[in-house]
Image (cartoon, helix red, strand yellow):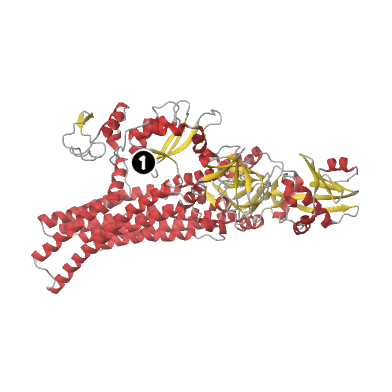
Amino acid sequence: MPSAPETTCYHCGEPVPAGADLSLEIDGRRRPMCCAGCRAVASMIRAAGLGRYYDFRTELAGRPEREADPGRFAAWDRAAVLDYHAVAADPVEKGRRSLVLVLENVHCAACAWLVRRYLERFAGIGEARLDVSDGRLRLDFDPARTPLSTIAAGLEALGYPPHLDAPGSGAERDRNERRRMLKYLIVAALGMMQVMSYALAGYLGAAAAGGSMDPETGHFFRLVSMLVAVPVALYAGQPFYRSALAHLARGHLGIDVPVAAAILLALFSSVALTLFGDGEVYFDSVVMFIFFLLLGRFAVMLARQQSGAAQSALARALPARARRLTASGSEDVGLVELSAGDRVLVADGEVVPADGEVESGNGRVDEALISGESEPRARAPGDPVLAGSLVTGGGLTVRVTATGRATVLSGIVDLLGEARRRRPRLARLADRVAGGFIVLILVASAIAALAWWQIDPARVIPVVLSMLVVACPCALALGTPTALAAATRGLAADGVLTANPDALEAVPRLTHVVLDKTGTLTGPAMRIAGIEVHGGLGRDRAIAICAALERVSTHPIARAFEAGHESEHSDTAAGAVAGIAVQQPESLAGAGVSGVIDGVRYWLGRPDWVSDRAGIDIDVPENGTRVVLAGGGRCAVIRLEAAPRRGGRELIEQLQNAGVEVVLASGDREAAVAETARGMGIAEYHAGCSPDGKLALIRRLQRAGGVVAMLGDGINDAPVLAGADVSIALAEGAAIARTQADLVVTGRDLHPAARAFELAPRVRRIVRQNLGWALAYNAAALPLAAIGLIPPWAAAIGMSLSSLGVVLNARRLGRARGRTPGAARTGFSPAPEAGASA
């Protein structure tokens, strides 16, 4: 970037006070500084050997607001603050922490380079990644070697004041971006209307005068048009000039390079003709061009900000404070003061402040914001609860197990943030194609200019201007990222989080889908599959007694007897258990439960344990999962099975109808896997598979030319998910914070996964439509503009309408079907960063 004039500060560009002598030698020259703060920052940059920052920065730095004061950040070194905002960065080096800081004054890649190189000077610094788009610095450091307060004070002294990542920081940044773009848009709109009125007056005056206007009047209208158009173009066109300079500084041609060239060429050629010559001017075309471009860019910016709505909503989901139980009662504390092991009260209608386990109380918990599950789930002592979930119909006492960035909610926010920052392969490919097309446009424009110079020199500028504008590959660059953004937004509304947008490209090419059984086709809960009663014990009575006894147990099998759980006997339990009182309850881990009901001691649990306690011989088949109820000389043998997930059969039928081969691979025993395969209509199945065995199966299919997707629960299937071409994980509980899958299915059924397989072919089709339209439009418009058939004003409208067309076509993918009430309520719609400008 060219250095600032000598009357302004070399570092920040502010005016230098009269008589100030704060200059500093940089690159062999005395550079003026406006204040001691800028001089100190520039001295620090020079002393650290980072003077190249001034060579390739594209914007002036911000002026330091205050002198660096390490004491201001002393509170950041407190254990409670670190525990809340940071997580362990390395499981081996226990002391290392990872956290996110939001930096002010981040403008360009030079800022990221400067911050990264500056932080390398501190001991214990690992990874330091600064995202220029949102100013977030992801920092891996060792607080024992360099305290966080020292790092924060150094960043502030460098001119980038840091803040601990807060839920509202992204919303405030988006709001400021909208305001800034609206200012540009309003100025361009007002300028366009004013200049167009002058142009219209000139056209009408010429028509009234018989086709020509007297020179004095014509010159007057050109002058007033220039007085309006020049400041409007220089102010409202800033986004394009800055973007073009940034791309050129990095050594490649971006889509804003021909845009900026066209604007400046038309503007200054019109100024020159107005002041020093005679000919057609293009002030009306310039301001119209800027307005339509800004309108398209504003629409894309809104779509990009909407794509982060889920991330912002989740980040703001936690309450500001919590009620912590103490020996003397309760106290109101901030979330940063909570730590693992604390006990908190969560009343009806309140939000759970941290991940934890219910210690006492009963209620239902709405997890729609986190998992997309539309129905609240019952929670009793021993059950887990997640930060950000809403308690309804009861109150809970929760023992905290994780806070801050260690919670599941924070894991989802990080997952969505990483997805937004990730550039899909198709988008990168489109950018490369657009870059090549820009070269073609510039070369073709130069050839056309030489040709028209020989034919009619007066037509050179309008022809070149039309070519630069009409063939700008904005639609080409926008077609892919906007389609992927809309698709991931629609999938998220249906309960599928897209961690890797490239997966949507691979899904339509799948030949095989490998399914896990336990935890995937079948849920984690058990259900009653059958019951045999002996000794006069009725079936309904047996189920009711089991349900009453299991209320004292937290074992997963106990859920099979819960009222409302999926079972043909659930209604029986629900109706009868309320009238049964259990006295002297006992529970033995790994064995079963017992209690006295109506004066009779009953035992329920493992067959051999019940047989010993009840003193009776019970004949129990060895296959399957069975529990025994016995007491008073009567008994019942209850067969349990894992409940199949809703939507599993529909998903398999959908894949098979699409010609995809479905394979079941499970670590379970042969009989159970075969039974599940038969029930689901799967021809090929493999039992007794370890994670390595599943991975070997996928490798074998890939070597045979297959494109393989793995659908698993994301815990013990991690190696297999990593080896598949497309990995899809079901996320229940803490698994969602740890999974590295391409797609993450929330909720408790497989309908969202079916939606992903259904939507992916449409994504490919719309991407092809967008790219085909953009290429066809550019290929047709460029020669027409080269032969002078498209005037500059029509080129501006055509290019803007082309860009808006691909954006509107892509937004069709965001229309979700089967949206859960919870998802609709929260506006759950994440998407990757579009990464391109209109």
Assess disc 1: are there few (<14), some (14-19) or many (≥20) residues with their C-alpha within 10 Å of its C-alpha.
some
Count of numbered marks: 1
Query: Measuring 87% from the left and 41% from the top, which residue is drawn there?
Result: 613
Extreme residue in the front direction: 328
Give the camera-side residue of 206 and 384: 384
Return the residue nearer the eye: 577 or 674. Answer: 577
Along the line of sight, the residue nearer the viewer: 445 or 113? 113
The amino acid type of the residue labelled 1 equals Glu
Name the residue carrying label 1: 104
Horizontal side of residue 604 vs 719, given as left or right:
right
Where is residue 571? Give x, y as percent. Answer: 75, 59
Q: Is residue 695 visible?
A: yes
Of the pair 813 and 143, the residue shown nearer to us = 143
Q: Where does the image place residue 791, in percent across and percent down from the top left?
A: 24, 62
Q: Residue 656's quadrant in the figure?
A: bottom right
Using the rendered view, name the quadrant where residue 342 is placed. top right
Q: How far across and down, in percent of the image, does residue 488 sit?
A: 50, 53
Left of 534 or right of it: where is 332?
A: left
Circle 1 — which element? loop
Q: Quadrant of the C terminus?
A: bottom left
The answer to whether residue 528 is left or right of residue 809 is right
Q: Residue at x 75, y 50 (%)?
A: 641
Q: Quadrant of the N terminus?
A: top left
Image location of residue 20, percent across then percent down: 18, 33
**Residue 792 in view (yes/no):** no
